[in-house]
Image: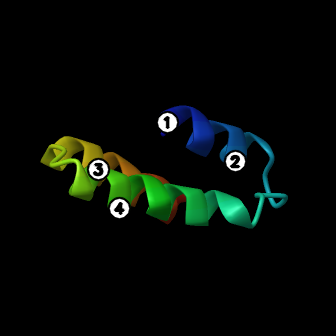
Amino acid sequence: MTALVEAGLAEGDAVPPNLVGRLRDLERFVIEAGGDRQSLQVTASGRRLL
């Protein structure tokens, strides 16, 4: 997740439109898999940064 956000930030204004969607999908996967709170926080923070 961190690598996706870092790549998006490095591209500046050219953030791929599907990157936020991919982060949402990852967040859903973490929730469904019973992931921990920290993983959910990372995805939410990444979306906010973008």
Badge 4 amino acid: Arg
Pick whichever of labels 4 and 1 is earlier in the sequence.
1
Pick whichever of labels 2 and 4 is earlier in the sequence.
2
Check disc 1 and report the residue beneath it: 2
Compared to residue 11, the image places residue 14 above or below, namely below
Check disc 4 and report the residue beneath it: 28
Where disc 1 sits, the SS reads helix
Badge 3 amino acid: Val
Compared across the picture, whether 15 is left or right of 5 comes to right
Q: Residue at x 23, y 57 (%)?
A: 31
Per the model, the C-alpha gap separating discs 3 and 1 is 14 Å
- Residue 7: percent from the left, percent from the top? 69, 38
- Residue 50: percent from the left, percent from the top? 59, 60
Where disc 4 sits, the SS reads helix
Per the model, the C-alpha gap separating discs 3 and 2 is 21 Å
Per the model, the C-alpha gap separating discs 4 and 1 is 16 Å
Where disc 2 sits, the SS reads helix
Pick whichever of labels 2 and 1 is earlier in the sequence.
1
* Contact check, label 4 and label 1, Cβ < 8 Å: no
Rendering colour mode: rainbow
Q: Residue at x 29, y 50 (%)?
A: 30
Check disc 3 and report the residue beneath it: 30
* Contact check, label 2 and label 1, Cβ < 8 Å: no
Per the model, the C-alpha gap separating discs 3 and 4 is 5 Å
In this view, the residue farthest toward the top is 3
* Contact check, label 3 and label 1, Cβ < 8 Å: no
Q: How busy is the neighbourhood of tag 4: few (under 14 within 10 Å), some, or many (20 plus)?
A: some
Q: How busy is the neighbourhood of tag 2: few (under 14 within 10 Å), some, or many (20 plus)?
A: many
Q: Nearer the viewer, residue 18 or 12?
A: 18
Q: Which image quadrant for residue 14?
A: bottom right
